[in-house]
Structures are given as structure tokens and as C-alpha cells.
Image: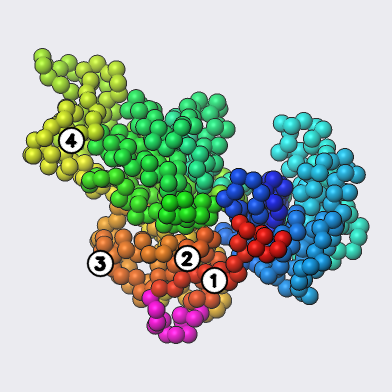
Amino acid sequence: MEFICKIAGQAGAGVMTTSRLMVKCFTRGGYNAVGYPEYPSLIRGGHNTVQVRISDKPVNTPLAHQELVIALNKDAVFYHMSTMSSGGAIIYDQMIDISKFSVRSDVKMYALPLAKLTADAGGTEQMKNTAALGAALGMIDYPFEILEQLMSDELAHKGPEVIKKNVGAARAGYDYVKSNSFPFEKKVKPISVGKKNIVITGNEAIALGSIKAGCKFYAAYPMTPASTILHAMIDNEKRFKLVVKQTEDEIAAINYAIGASFAGARSMVGTSGGGFALMAEALGFAAIAEVPIVIALAQRSGPSTGMPTWTEQGDLRFALHASQGDFPRVVLAPGDMQECFFLSALSHNLSGKYQVPVIILSDKFLSETVFSTAPFDHSKVKIEAGKIKSNLPALAPMARYKRYALSADGVSDRVLPGEPFGTHVATSYEHDETGFSSESFHMRVHQVQKRAKKLETLKHELPPPLIYGPKDAPISLVCWGSTKLTLIDALPLLENAGIKANIIHFTTVFPLHQADLEKLFKNTKTKIMVEANSSAQFAGVIRECSGIEMDFHFLKYDGRPFYPEQLLEQLQKLKAAGFKGNKEVIFVEKEDLEYFNPTRHGL
């Protein structure tokens, strides 16, 4: 059983709040759910949408169509008519004039007195979205009691009067639909009330994984789509005794974090591409001073300001090469909520143990989409501090502590400020073993080689690529980060179409090792890289590390994630052509609605 609903309206109409309530409501009924948001880069106004997709089977991504639309303004009626399923329905306030719109004959249009229902229930104008939510649940015959209990839980901190008004508005919409004739074929019944899944975004999972791994300092300047990591850390600041700083800019944020890390606090910053650009110099400082730092880099469309609220995977090369000179770093790219949590925890351990920068590479789709997922198993997270030394032996007269002593594994013993006999210099200059700046040619070579050894030392702790689907499949869809979600949802579609394929998903995107890649791709016949950028960046990284070439590149960079239906369509075309033809396939949406400019459409 599957159901797809889109909630759409002007910013401020409660689209995001309503959608999260819907995802939680279905999750409590035992369903797997995903709520994918879209919104323009505007301070006020603009068209906001969230597609809520639920299923009794695992579900990970939005689809290119919907069965029900909750239209909170006239723009929503116009924009989403073309993507409605045949037999679908649009519910909207009867005060909205749609007489000038071309309405499809196979789509039901239901005008509801949402404003009146809300007022009669004692609610305010702003609660029309709540009445519409109740109406939507009534149309699919979903038990109102689940929504009522959810609202009581979610609004408990606002008091009984607020709960009463919201429940009343939702009940009014629900009862109105149930007592009038609004036929809709799809019905949704709970399958396992009380199932203990949680509802969370990627950014929230990254924040919680970091906290569990002992992160005590977080600094950031707000930047979409990383901002909600900051919100999540602030929400948990008192509970877990964190220090969270909203700084004046990203340069300050990373330098705050480096200072806190030098002092002994596990530290992290979060940003997107433009903010990461400002952090590049300090990233190199952390590397040469060997101060642990974790950076959550949530990608969006670039370059420059680009399309700030839309998704892309275009910052991989930037993450690999940011800051001048050669130095070790680790780049991890989670692909789902569990990986967001556990890879964030791993990032702090790797950074602390090996004294290297670790970058968590996410994207807008993964960062802000709401998913239902199994609760995280906190017992799997262990805090590993690495070589932090105390109770040092006394130094000989005129001797200095060798903070950067040459070592076989590339990791030198670290001491925290105030440790007797551990005083040392941490500098941005190349240095000798004590930390004092040095221009010795031999010491320069020794220190560069010492730092580089860390990548070889830590490689056994990096998660390997995982294969989903039959290992002997003739087609391998290769991906990294969030594109895994679309590919997993596409596998059943491909199987039904007679296309046998598997998925090879990388969460470690750097470092990669030639022998591992050669073994992984040894028996793969057709390799198709699927990534959301214009230059097949990860395909290039694999080629550089191993000489292995992808047979085809499936690329998308219009701002939206891949849809499973799109992948099926392209693979069918490729199969029909005997897997010959252009190496690059560019995915672009069929319609161009331009949510930024409704006047273009006369709305």
C-alpha cells in the first residue's frame, strides 16, 4: 500500500508544520514515511511544498506525481495540476477562485469552507492548514484519534487551550469531509499502531550523532541548508551541557571551533558551500596544527549563491581540495538517517584519534527531508579519544615537549593546555617536533610524510562501499551520499521491468584505495555512476584513484533529487539501445514551474 500527498501554499501558511504532523501521524500508524520539502530563496512569500509519501514497505524518496494535493492558495492548484495521478484529488478553500485555470477531467476538485470551519471551531485564520489536514485524513478514512493524540503530544508545551483549538479545527475538516460526498478511492488504515519509529531530518540526525560522540562545542553562521543543525544543537544545549555559538561569520565559526578543540572540547562547525569557502584557510591551519575538527558541509546548488534552497552534490571536489598544500583529510557522505547518525559519531572519533579534519558531506535533500526511521542504537557509539596524554614525565633542562614527534603511524601524542611539562606551540607555520616554526628542508619532508601516514593508518576504520541488490547483476548503479535513497526505491521498478541491477553505495568518498576499488568492480559488466552534479565528480575521483572508468554517467543538477521513475525511464532507453550511445545522460524536469516567479504565470 502506498499513498502520496502534497501540501502546498505560500510561506507562512503552515506547509512545513502540517507536513511534519502528517509524517508523524502516518508513522504512528505503522507506515514508513518521507516528507520532502521545496521552497524558494525568499525572505517572505514564495511557494512552499512538501510531498509526503508513505508505504507499508520501506520508502526513501519523493516521486514525480501525487494522488492528493492540499492546496492552501490558488498557486498550489495551478502548479501541481500537471503532476497529479489520474483519479487524484485537489482540496482547496472555496474562497479560492480557480475559474481561470485549466482543470484536468481526470482530477477531482473539492472546494471546502476551510476558513468557516476553522472559525466555527474557535480557531484562527492561521489554522486553516490544520482544518485541511483533518479533511485530508477524512478523505482517506484514516483514524482521527491518531492525529488528536499527536497534536496533544506536540502542543503540550503551549497549553490546553491551544491544543483544544487545533484539535477542533482538524476535527471540523475531518467531520465535514466524512459527512459530505467527497469520493476518493485510496483509503489508508493503520497497520501497526504504536510502532516505535522516530521522525527526523538528516541535519537533526547529524546533530544527535555528534552529541552522542561527545561533541561539546558547535559554532555556525546560519546558511541553508545547514542551519537546522544549529537549531538542533541549540535545542539540546542545556540538556547535554553544550556550548553553541552563532557567530558573526563562517571565518569566526571555524576559528572558534579550532580554539575549543585545542582546549580539549570535541568541536564541530556546520555550513554550506559559500560558508565553507570562507573556512578554507582555517581548515589548513587545523590540518598543520593537527587540531581535530569536524565540518558538516550541506551542499546546495552553486557556484556562488547559486540556487540556495535546492539540492546538488557539486561540492565534492571542493571538499577534497579546499585549502592550499597537501594534507590528510577524511570525507564521509551519509546516505540515510542511520548513516547520518553513526557517521557523524565516527567523524568525531576519527578526527580526535588521528588529529585530522573530517568533513561530513550532506546535501539539501538529505539535510531537510523528514524521514521515519528506526531509533538509533546508541550502544553502538563509543567515544574514542586517541592519544591524549597526561601525567607526563619531567623534562630535562631547556628541553621542550615534542607535540609533533615523528611516529610510525603518523599520529603524535597530544596534550591539552595546562598539562605540566606539556607546553607547546600550535602554529600555522611548518614546524619541528616541538611545534616551533622551522624551515629545515629535512624536517619539512618528515612532517609532511608523518601527517600523510595517517590516511594509511586510519583506513581500516572507514566504512566500505555496500552493495544493495543481487551481487551478480550485470548492471551496477554506483552512487555516493543521498542518491542511494532514490536508487533503492528504483530497484523494484527495475526488477518489474526486467532490468537486473544492483547498487554500489559509497559513504567513504575519501580516501579511496586502488586495490579495494579494483576488487569491488572486478566482475561488474556495466557501471553507471549516478550523482547530482554536472561533471561526474565522483566518477572522476574513482578514475584518479584506480584508473577505473564508468561506462555511463547519470547526472542531475536542476535542483531536485533524482526520481525513481526517471531512472527507470532512462535505463529502459539505455537497454533498448543495447547499452550504447552517449556516455552522459542529463536528467531535467519535464515542466518548468519557476516557483520564484508566480507573476510569470499570471497568478
Type of amino acid under label 3: Gly
Q: CA distance from mark 1 to mark 4?
A: 51 Å
> In this rendering, which labeled residue sits more in front, label 3 or label 4?
4
Instruction: Give residue 430's mark.
Output: 4
- Give the residue number, with chain letter if any, for mark 1: 566
**Residue 573 falls inside the magenta stretch:** yes
Circles 2, 4 touching at the beta carbon (< 8 Å): no
| Relative height, residue 537 to residue 271 (above, below) | below
Q: CA distance from mark 2 to mark 4?
A: 42 Å
User: From the viewer's perspective, is 286 left or right of 127?
Assistant: left
> In this rendering, which labeled residue sits more in front, label 2 or label 3?
2
Kindly identify the residue that appears in the image at 42 percent across and 34 percent down.
253
Lower position in the chain sequence, tag 2 or tag 3? 3
Question: Which secondary structure, mark 4?
Answer: loop
Q: CA distance from mark 2 to mark 1?
A: 11 Å
Lower position in the chain sequence, tag 1 or tag 4? 4
Lower position in the chain sequence, tag 2 or tag 1? 2
Residue 239: x, y in percent?
Answer: 55, 27
- For label 1, count other residues whose C-alpha is less than 10 Å away and answer few (under 14), some (14-19) or many (20+): some
- Give the residue number, with chain letter if any, for mark 3: 547
> In this rendering, which labeled residue sits more in front, label 1 or label 4?
4
Type of amino acid under label 4: Glu
The quarter in which the N terminus is drawn is bottom right
Decide which of 449, 461 is in the foreground and name it.
Answer: 449
Type of amino acid under label 2: Lys
Lower position in the chain sequence, tag 3 or tag 1? 3
